[in-house]
Amino acid sequence: MENQKKRIFSGIQPSGDLTLGSYMGAIKNWVALQDEYECLYCIVDMHAITVRQNPAEMRRRTIEQLAQYIACGLDPQKNIMFIQSHVPQHAELGWILGCYTQFGELSRMTQFKDKSAKHKDNITAGLFTYPVLMAADILLYQADLVPVGADQKQHVELCRDIAKRFNSVYSETFVLPDPFIPKMGARVMSLANPENKMSKSDPDGCIYLMDKPEDVMRKFKRAVTDSEMAVKFDKENKPGISNLLTIYCTATGKTMEEAEAQFAGQGYGVFKPAVGEAVVELMRPIREEAQRLLADKAYLEGVYREGAQHAQYLANKTLSKVQRKIGFVGR
Ligand code: ATP
Ligand code: LTN
């Protein structure tokens, strides 16, 4: 990490199995950017516990998620891959940054509003301060770029505001990060309910990266569309078809014009299975490689242990600078 490359940080919560949404919105771009940047890719288990998790399931998913990161094409030799809770500096900086974040700012976060509406019986302080921990994740590593889906843009903007505020009080300390949001695939919608984002904690209409081909095909054949016949991109009036077209283009690399031309005059009965097949082919090598990697737990353990060590080294540099600036006595 001693060269001049710009830095990337991103993470995904082990709150459910990885989905086609997290692949197209985030991981696909992580893979594309891994040569150009120094990258840290994290499994953010501390974020996941902001809503109740089953402990055994979360442990399983955390390891599987690492295997899936690698299977998607992230090279452990090139990238630092680690588990958030293995680097306690995240929590320490998170506390400090919380003292530079306004209650009002956190109250305006749409993810908090959505999730607190969904988990009415468990609206914890952790759910509320979630974006502060996310800011700590990013700022600890002085990341320049944060590749995420569109839903996370607001959190990255808040992170920037917190960093600016801290810098203006104590002099230049943090790099201001930019979100990196893909032009296509930034917001994959649910197949069952195309008005909603495809979300791993909402199994209805969700494609999981590890789904078997027959399940993927079944979900695509059942995807909610409309009562017309035309395979045309029109987000307002044809949200289901527009979502399927976006998935098809992202999976195959075709442009929207090419896809529309390919399916012109054909019914949904031809189009839907074609999208399913494109996704099956996209996911097949990922699923097979993830299964192969999962058979070698010692290898995966080596990757996350080494990742945490490397991450701690980098995190400590920022954390000690911050502690000194705010007036903590050195240890
Ligand atoms: P949860 O339902 O537990 O909140 P999630 O399915 O929304 O989880 P996250 O872990 O929050 O997934 O997101 C992982 C990454 O994938 C983030 O960068 C997020 O923006 C992106 N992402 C998640 N869902 C989608 C989607 N449907 N379309 C595009 N990007 C997505
Ligand atoms: N909030 C993100 C996950 C996340 C993240 C991060 C993403 C936690 N910390 C730092 C980018 C950078 C989400 O996807 N729900």
Image (cartoon, rainbow, N blue to C red):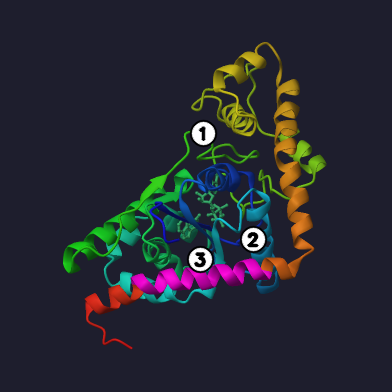
Q: Is residue 121 magenta?
A: no
**Where is mark 1, residue-wise?**
184
Dot placed on the residue nearer the N-terminal end, 1 or 3? 3
- The quadrant in which the N terminus is found is bottom left
- Beta carbon of the mark 3 residue lies under 8 A of ligand 2: yes
Q: Is residue 310 magenta?
A: yes
Is 314 on the left or on the right of 78, as rendered?
left
Dot placed on the residue nearer the N-terminal end, 2 or 1? 2
Report which quarter residue 128 is drawn in.
bottom left
**Where is mark 2, residue-wise?**
66
Q: Which residue: 52% across, 69% down?
A: 84
- The quadrant in which the C terminus is found is bottom left
Q: Distance between the residues labelled 2 and 1?
A: 25 Å
Q: Where is residue 200 in the image (x, y as percent from the top left)?
A: 62, 53
For residue 47, the mark is: 3
Give the residues in magenta.
301-318
Q: Position of residue 169 (x, y in %)?
A: 17, 67
Q: Mark 2 and mark 1 in contact? Answer it, CB < 8 Å.
A: no
